[in-house]
Image (tube, helix red, strand yellow):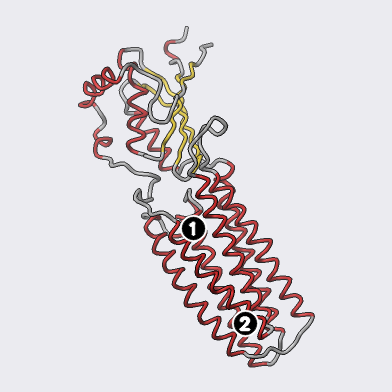
Amino acid sequence: MSKPRTLSQADHGRAPFGAANSQRRGADARVAARRDPSEVRHEPSTEAGERRDAPSPRPVIYAALACNAAIAAAKFLAALLTGSAAMAAEGVHSTVDMGNQGLLLYGLKRSRRPADQDFPFGYGKEVYFWSFVVAIELFTVGAGAALVRGAWRLHHPGPQQHFLINYLVLGIAVLFEGSTWLFAVKQFSKTKGRRSFIQAVRYGKDPSRFMVLFEDTASILGLLIAIAGIGAEQLTGQSIFDGMASILIGCVLSTSAVWLAYETKGLLIGESANRETVDDIRRIAAHVEGITRVHEVLSMHVGPQFILVAITLELCAGRARRHAIDRLEERLKHRHPRIRRVFVRVRKSDRLED
């Protein structure tokens, strides 16, 4: 039985294989003419279907944070003056959104810390962890408070006052939330590439980019439900509609929280790169001179901008094998800048076994 030889990369900028840089440049020059034409034409990319020049998610988060701070104060004041359960639920909703956006900013800041001895692959997964915390907070605090407030309203009915204040505050909130939602959609459209919005969320690797869009969408739905509930109570004189509106807002928040938790769970555990990226890695490796066969390609997102790749392959018996792994790493990082570490396990060819 042959014993596989394991080779790993010492740092993300240079692989510990091959000879000196001058020898490697000479080897690359000799094989340049024999490279696969498709590799020469390809421009650097990130994940398939996504744009490489994606803007930072911070401006959207800051805009939503400022908007929610003003709206939350107005909602709580209106709830205090009118006694509306739906308005109180919306105030809690905006407050929870503020906390969520603060957690996202905190996670983004911590994820930028450089790698160290304890975390050699960096802190990129901090974004995934705090995004998951946001989903939990949205479910427990936001949805829970709205459901409890709605149930209390159903068991303790009472007439509302000052309906005009509710409509005024909710109308202003719709304008503010609508503006931040449009801004979030515009920024997210710059990153989703050719994919639809649903596909971009499903296959996206940076939850901070769609978290605000999710929250703003849920906020607008909640505002519309609150307006409908207050309007129904004003028309019929039945406070049950206000309580039902609060419960429906809680259902919207809980549904959003479960979806967010589901989308971030895989990234937190260790989700692979998109299938298109993995297939492209295999194709590039198969066309590198000196590599005769690619057995296995494993990948994992260590952060939104960090892909770890592990490849099992066979090398030829000639001189071309000397610089094959160097060329492979160079081409992978040029094609996919998110690939930061490449680990290669060289397997002895079956034809060379005794």
Lower sequence index among marks 1 and 2: 2
Q: x and y percent of residue 326 in the render?
A: 35, 24
Q: Residue 78: which disc? A: 2
Q: Residue 310: which disc? A: none
Residue named by callout 1: 210
Q: Quadrant of residue 39?
A: top left
For the N terminus, the quadrant is top right
Residue 148 drawn above or below residue 207: below
Instruction: Please identify, in this view, whether the residue under mark 1 or under mark 2 is nearer the observer.
Output: 2
What residue type is disc 1 on?
Phe
Q: Is residue 343 left or right of residue 246?
A: left
Task: Tell me which residue sits at (48%, 38%) in the image.
Answer: 114
Task: Tell me which residue sits at (63%, 90%) in the image.
Answer: 162
Q: CA distance from mark 1 to mark 2?
A: 30 Å
Q: Is residue 40 left or right of residue 125?
A: left
Q: x and y percent of residue 56 in the render?
A: 41, 54
What residue type is disc 2 on?
Ala
Which residue lies most toward the left here? 33
Q: Secondary structure at mark 1?
A: helix
Q: Quadrant of residue 315?
A: top left
Which residue lies most toward the right here? 155
Task: Tell me which residue sits at (59%, 48%) in the image.
Answer: 129
Q: x and y percent of residue 32 in the render?
A: 22, 26
Q: Residues within 10 Å of mark 2 (few under 14, many from 20)?
A: many
Q: Is residue 74 left or right of residue 83?
A: left
Q: Residues within 10 Å of mark 1 (few under 14, many from 20)?
A: many
**Residue situated in front as seen by the camera: 202 or 112:** 112
Residue 32 drawn above or below residue 75: above
Are dots 1 and 2 in contact, CB under 8 Å?
no
Q: Is residue 158 left or right of residue 130?
A: right
Residue 14 drawn above or below residue 84: above
